[in-house]
Image (spheres, rainbow, N blue to C red):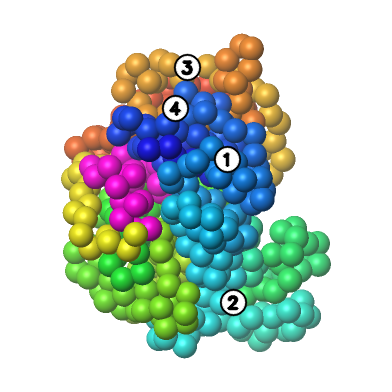
Amino acid sequence: MKILVVGGGGREHAVCRALYSEGGHELYCAPGNGGIAALAKCVNIAATDVDAMVAFAKEEGMDLVCVTPDDPLALGMVDRLTEIGIPAFGPSKLAARIESSKAFSKDLMKRYGIPTAKFEVFSDPDAAKAYIRESGAPIVVKADGLALGKGVYVCSSVEEAENAVNEIMIDRTFGDSGNRVLIEECLFGPEASLLCFTDGSTVVPMPAAQDHKRVGDGDIGPNTGGMGAFAPTPKMTAEVKAEVMEKIVYPTIAAMNAEGCPFKGVLYFGLMLTQKGPMVIEYNSRFGDPETQAILPLLKTPLSEVFMAVIEERLGELTVEFSADACVCVVLASGGYPGKYEKGKLISGIDDALTEGAIVYHAGTALSEDGFATSGGRVLGVTAVEKDLESAIRAAYGYVNYISFDGMQYRKDIGRK
């Protein structure tokens, strides 16, 4: 098949690697990155340039387009591709609202009885801050729209929460995504991410993963796009998973159908396993990053077959299998991330890690005359697959030791949650 993957980060590298391993495909990635270029032809089209992407897919006669990032999904790229007869994996613009508008998703959960934190939505910063003072802390402040995984503030004091409102709504740190804020009660318990393939009726859950959002060991410091992940998580026991499927997953799919916007693609459930039972923290309308880097190496069924079964609404006819192994992904980030950071730092040791058996996903790299150099905040995802979690943790950090670049930072406790 002739396949185009939209995006250019570690998640897209994981998708390209899974498709490449099937053999026989002609792969393209737009815009791609330095590492993806070894697997696919990279095309210099921004993931958010819907017109150019659709035109390219049409001109090249793509048999399949996988739209992985949140922004082009929210902009309706899948709808546009479908309209011209190109099979596209991902939800429609209306269905993607489950991520692109937290107000929409929280209202959906409220109306259909899907367990989540209590919340209020505000378009006026003074009203939001008044509610925070009334409610007290700890409390959670969220930008309504897409914010690269960084628009969530878990605040331990009223002052911290008011500052978060100022950053989102007044300083406009996330642009128009901060037109509204959600103020939520703070939930407590271990987190887990459950990603599911769905064609709008059949649901196939993947191995549950755990992400590590905060930049520092022990979950300290600001939120990032994710500093590492592992799968499967022992927190998601068979009993807990059954409860999640019954009370959250199936009701969400049914709710989207009832709203006239059936969801097809990968639906990501960000969960908090509280004493009152599992509750939804957030939905994503696509593969999570870096959870995908820890899940796809465990997939045994050809990914392209899963994509086409979802698009053609015949997922129930396909047996989707995952290995029983464990996978750990450690993100190597630029110094200063998630704040300001420098680019262009030469990276050494990638080939050595690969020789030893690592999977190395490129997230923010560019190919220079001297080799790979940093070009983003999250640079690499160093990944290991082993028979059990402890072995995968040891192996992943062993591979990390081979790699270095100026200012490199990473968490030392991935998999230890």
Disc 2 residue type? Ala
Question: Looking at the picture, does residue 161 appear above or below residue 130?
Answer: above
Q: Nearer the viewer, mark 1 or mark 3?
A: 1
Q: Is residue 304 magenta?
A: yes
Question: Looking at the picture, does residue 202 appear above or below residue 217?
Answer: below
Residues under numbered marks 4 and 3 in contact, where contact means CB atoms less than 8 Å apart: no
Disc 4 residue type? Leu
Q: Residue at label 3? A: 349
Q: Position of residue 393 (x, y in %)?
A: 32, 36
Q: Is residue 193 magenta?
A: no
Q: Position of residue 403 (x, y in %)?
A: 48, 21
| Majority SS type along the magenta span | helix
Q: Position of residue 348 (x, y in %)?
A: 52, 16
Mark 4 and mark 1 lie on one chain; the one further toward the N terminus is 4
The answer to whether residue 97 is visible is: yes
Residues under numbered marks 4 and 1 in contact, where contact means CB atoms less than 8 Å apart: no
Q: Residue at label 1? A: 59
Q: Residue at x 36, y 79 (%)?
A: 254
Q: Residue at x 43, y 44 (%)?
A: 63
Task: Please tell me how crowded label 2 is: few (under 14), some (14-19), or many (20+) other residues with Cα within 10 Å.
Answer: many
Question: Looking at the picture, does residue 394 appear above or below residue 186?
Answer: above
Q: Residue at x 47, y 66 (%)?
A: 283
Q: Residue at label 4? A: 39
Q: Which mark is residue 103?
A: 2
Asked where in the image residue 360 lies, by quadrant, the reply is: top left
The boundaries of the magenta stretch are 291-311
